[in-house]
Image (spheres, rainbow, N blue to C red):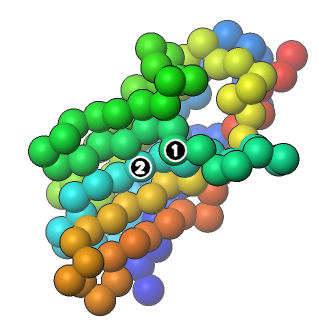
Amino acid sequence: QVQLVEFGGGLVQPGGSLTLSCTASGSIPGINAMRWYRHAPGKERELVASITTGSGTKYADSVKGRFTISGDNAKNAVWLQMASLKPEDTAMYYCNAKRPSYYSKYDYWGQGTQVTVSS
């Protein structure tokens, strides 16, 4: 079964940078939206950034100006460049890919990658 796999998490000091990558283990035709979510202990899951066909990119207010999402639908890949990281960015980051609901499976998730911002 095709899955999404995330890479690039780790421990970084405040003010530092990390780039997260997400790729599919196989081909997923028809992907039209890819998103990064994060989930910190004791908090609700947050949509961090999205890139969708026809709508471009969107960001949570908490990361605007610091994070950049980019993607390649043909390769089923998405990246999240994170700069000026803050301790409050600490969370498990998850990649999500969606395609139209007329596909039998249209919602894909990765297993998550931990980002810890601490001195």
Q: Residues within 10 Å of mark 2 (few under 14, many from 20)?
A: many
Residue matched to label 2: 35
Vertical arrangement, residue 45 with respect to residue 28, above or below: above
Q: Quadrant of the N terminus?
A: bottom left
Tag in front: 2 or 1: 1
List x then y, in percent, for residue 35. 41, 49
- Examine the rendering and report whether any part of residue 2 can be seen: yes
Depth check: 14 or 101 in front? 101
Task: Identify residue for label 1.
Answer: 47
Residue type, mark 2 in image: Arg
Q: Identify the element where label 2 is drawn.
A: strand
Rendering coords of residue 42 (x, y %) = 84, 47
Q: Residue at x 37, y 42 (%)?
A: 50
* Residue located 22% across and 58% down the image: 32
Residue projecting furthest to the left: 54
The circle drawn on residue 62 is: none
Q: Amino acid at mark 1?
A: Leu
Residue 27 seen by the camera: no
Q: For the residues labelled 2 and 1, say whether their Cβ atoms are less than 8 Å apart.
A: yes
